[in-house]
Amino acid sequence: MFSNERCYVCLSDVVSRITWETLLYTDQKQTICGSCQSKLIQIEGETCFKCSRPLQKLAKEYIDHGMCADCQRWEKDPAWKGVLDQNHSFYEYNDFLQELLAKFKYRGDYALAEIFSEKIRQFIKTVDYDVIIPIPLSDERLQERGFNQTEALLQVANLPYKILLKRTHSEKQSKKTRQERLQNAAVFEMTETLPAKKILLLDDIYTTGSTLHHAAKVLKLAGAEKVISITIARG
């Protein structure tokens, strides 16, 4: 057991343990201490097969054939049925992760992307896709923050991606009602011709699913056969 790094979150010593995993992946940097790691609650157990929402926290009447009520609403709407094929989220969106992502996104702590880079790299090895597309920020949000958090996640993970979507407005989707989000058909537009058929979208948080559904719809209309997404958190 040895310690030679500081935790990116609380700045305490990161105590590394020698395991078969650390011996096999000697280049894997430990960025977070055990205490902070324990506050990142991985999504496990039975989940909605469409969006990764933990089903054990829902009443049975809100679950239908392994699908949560939110996804049922999306799939029952002819305008949105089958638009987003599946989402996979890594962690529950608790207070700790909310603060961590806020530091990353709004306070410019770019290095925090390293906490999630290995998780992203390992997961996408299990996914069949042709191209990764990060969810873009509006020009206004990009100017405010100085970087796009979804691009940062991919850059730190050393994964290739393409910028094929552009936001057409700057207003936050979280400020709107669900009906307003659904009616706003011009959230994204394509910046160039779609080069592939199987698309992997990356975003930081899945809450209502509106952002990812809007992006997926534009991609499907452009000719995508399959659109799946991954997010760090599931709200």
Image (cartoon, rainbow, N blue to C red):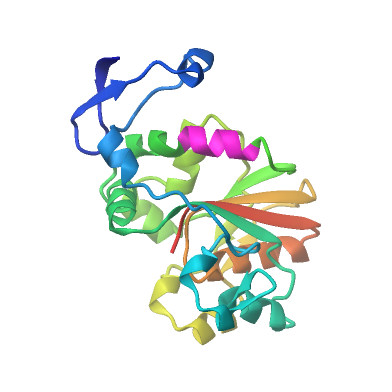
Residue 168 shows in the view: no
Which SS type dominates the magenta stretch?
helix
Query: Is residue 118 found inside the magenta-colored segment of the image?
Result: yes
Query: Is residue 133 found inside the magenta-colored segment of the image?
Result: no
Q: Which sits in the foreground, 5 or 211? A: 5
Above or below residue 113? Residue 52 is: below
Q: Residue 159's image quarter?
A: top right
Please report the bounds of the magenta region as a residue range.
Answer: 117-124
Q: Residue 152, position in %: x, y?
A: 45, 40
The image quadrant where one finds the N terminus is top left
Residue 16 shows in the view: yes
Residue positioned 39% across, 45% down in the render: 147
Above or below residue 66? Residue 78 is: below
Q: Which sits in the foreground, 4 or 111? A: 4
Task: State left or right for residue 115 relative to residue 215.
Answer: left
Residue positioned 39% across, 15% down in the render: 18
Residue positioned 29% across, 34% down in the render: 34
Above or below residue 186? Residue 231 is: above
Residue positioned 51% across, 37% down in the render: 119
Q: Which sits in the foreground, 123 or 166? A: 123
Q: Residue 27, position in %: x, y?
A: 47, 16
